[in-house]
């Protein structure tokens, strides 16, 4: 097994690391405090080719694979989770369904503007009655005069209501199939009459990321906006979530690493009892444990990405990676706050934001309990 990154992957990682340090870090605290969407940074990420890393070159993507994408997500999250989730949700949740299941025409219509970052894509699966139980979709779409008429609502949808949001791919019930719900995917462009993103939520973290409820009231889109075969929607979204977990797991590693970076730097500066606190074994133990756990978790995330890139089954590894990295991020950010003492509770210190940003990683894209179900099923239980 090859543990080395290729030259291209290394270059991408270093480019994103520089971008995160030079462009994101100086504004991250203010964006979080003012809950301002990072339009300028998205534009720059588009220019750097970060908004379409795994997509085909013919549509303006980087054709660089899942591992390269995971490296970029990790480096962004090391500095700021809001910027990272904007890019990650756009890529592996919003744009990926169009890349994987779209017709040539749908790809030609959407991928160039999405890969360039001119427009953002969102993924609308969760509903008030359909979260972990995602198959309980209540949103309905019926054909009328060559158009789908959509009625229903979605909630917690990332990237759905910014000035540059281009479209959302949603699940909707389009009929009955042997007594079961027939669920299909539809592309709904922003600005379509009857489709309204609501006011952004007030969240614990990810404050500069855009998250909204959506309503559909007699919203009409052309019949050709069906994404993939009719009735395949649920299966398609499960496949998207499988891949998306690798991105969220990369966020967990990046956030844990960012928290550790801050904790190490602070432990060298802060004096107590006449010496830097990093000289105390109690602090060293926390740092050593985190560094070991992060190194192991990172390998698991990269392994899941490699399996996906090799076309092998990655469901088990991605769910394992998502499960352990979410928990690790929560623990690492908590320990980093602890190492900062009272200053860790003050917003000027990045670990304060990191701590608030961590918790969603055990909830979004399938809760820990859902990951445990996926893993147990994969193991034959
Ligand atoms: C900031 C943010 C951004 C998001 N972005 C998106 C997005 O872009 N697109 C999108 O579609 N969704 C998005 N989500 C939704 C997210 O994926 C869901 O919140 C998540 O899947 C959990 O669903 P739920 O909130 O309905 O919780 P529920 O499903 O109601 O779960 C509540 C609790 O019950 C547990 N539970 C449920 N079923 C079981 C079971 N069978 N066994 C054991 N325990 C169980 C859960 O693990 C959890 O602890 C986002 C959420 C947030 C907060």
Image (cartoon, grey):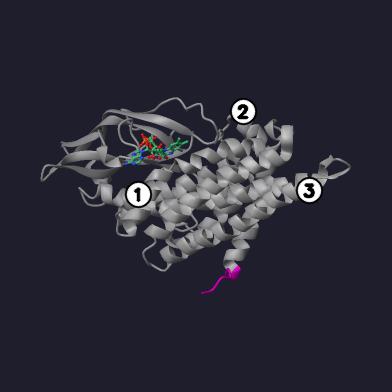
Q: Secondary structure beneath disc 3? A: loop
Q: Which residue is mark 2?
A: 34
Residue beneath the point at 27% across and 47% down: 234
Q: Residues within 10 Å of mark 3 (few under 14, many from 20)?
A: few
Marked residue nearer the N-terminal end (2 or 1): 2
Callout in the foreground (2, 1): 1
Residue 368 on the magenta span: no
State how far apart marks 3 and 2 are (Cα): 37 Å
Residue neighbourhood size for the residue with mark 2, other residues' Cα within 10 Å, grouped as few (<14), some (14–19), many (≥20)? few
* Residue wearing tag 1: 373
Choose the circle earlier in sequence order: 3 or 1: 3
* Mark closer to the chain start, 3 or 2: 2
Quarter in which the C terminus is drawn: bottom left
Question: Disc 3 designates what residue?
Answer: 280
Q: Nearer the viewer, mark 3 or mark 1?
A: 3
Q: Position of residue 265 (x, y in %)?
A: 76, 48
Q: CA distance from mark 3 to mark 1?
A: 41 Å
Residue at screen point 47% across, 27% down = 201
Image side of residue 70 versus residue 214, left or right: right
Picture quadrant where residue 154 is located? top left
Instruction: State ligand 1's quadrant.
Output: top left
Label 2 residue SS: helix
Label total for image: 3
Q: Position of residue 217 (x, y in %)?
A: 27, 26
What segment carries the magenta color?
1-7
């Amino acid at each position: 097994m090859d543990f080395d990154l290729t030259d291209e992957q290394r270059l991408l990682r270093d480019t994103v690391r520089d971008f995160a340090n030079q462009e994101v870090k100086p504004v991250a605290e203010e964006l979080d405090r003012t809950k301002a969407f990072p339009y300028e940074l998205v534009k720059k990420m588009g220019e750097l080719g970060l908004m379409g890393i795994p997509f085909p070159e013919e549509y303006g993507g980087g054709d660089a694979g899942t591992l390269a994408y995971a490296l970029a997500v990790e480096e962004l999250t090391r500095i700021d989770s809001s910027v990272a989730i904007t890019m990650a949700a756009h890529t592996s949740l919003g744009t990926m369904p169009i890349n994987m299941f779209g017709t040539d025409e749908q790809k030609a219509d959407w991928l160039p503007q999405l890969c360039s970052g001119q427009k953002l894509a969102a993924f609308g699966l969760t509903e008030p009655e359909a979260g972990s139980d995602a198959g309980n979709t209540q949103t309905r779409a019926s054909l009328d005069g060559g158009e789908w008429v959509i009625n229903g609502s979605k909630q917690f949808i990332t990237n759905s209501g910014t000035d540059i949001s281009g479209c959302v791919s949603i699940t909707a019930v389009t009929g009955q199939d042997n007594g079961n719900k027939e669920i299909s995917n539809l592309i709904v462009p922003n600005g379509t009459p009857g489709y309204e993103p609501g006011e952004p939520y007030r969240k614990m973290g990810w404050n500069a990321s855009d998250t909204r409820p959506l309503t559909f009231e007699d919203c009409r889109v052309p019949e050709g906006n069906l994404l993939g075969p009719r009735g395949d929607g649920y299966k398609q979204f499960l496949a998207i979530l499988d891949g998306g977990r690798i991105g969220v797991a990369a966020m967990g590693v990046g956030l844990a690493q960012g928290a550790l970076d801050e904790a190490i730097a602070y432990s060298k500066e802060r004096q107590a009892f006449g010496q830097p606190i990093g000289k105390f074994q109690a602090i060293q133990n926390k740092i050593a444990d985190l560094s070991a756990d992060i190194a192991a978790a990172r390998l698991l995330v990269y392994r899941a990405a490699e399996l996906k890139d090799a076309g092998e089954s990655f469901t088990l590894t991605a769910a394992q990676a998502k499960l352990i990295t979410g928990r690790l991020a929560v623990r690492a950010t908590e320990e980093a706050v602890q190492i900062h003492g009272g200053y860790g509770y003050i917003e000027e210190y990045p670990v304060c934001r990191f701590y608030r940003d961590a918790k969603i990683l055990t909830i979004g894209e399938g809760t820990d309990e859902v990951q445990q179900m996926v893993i147990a099923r994969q193991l034959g239980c």
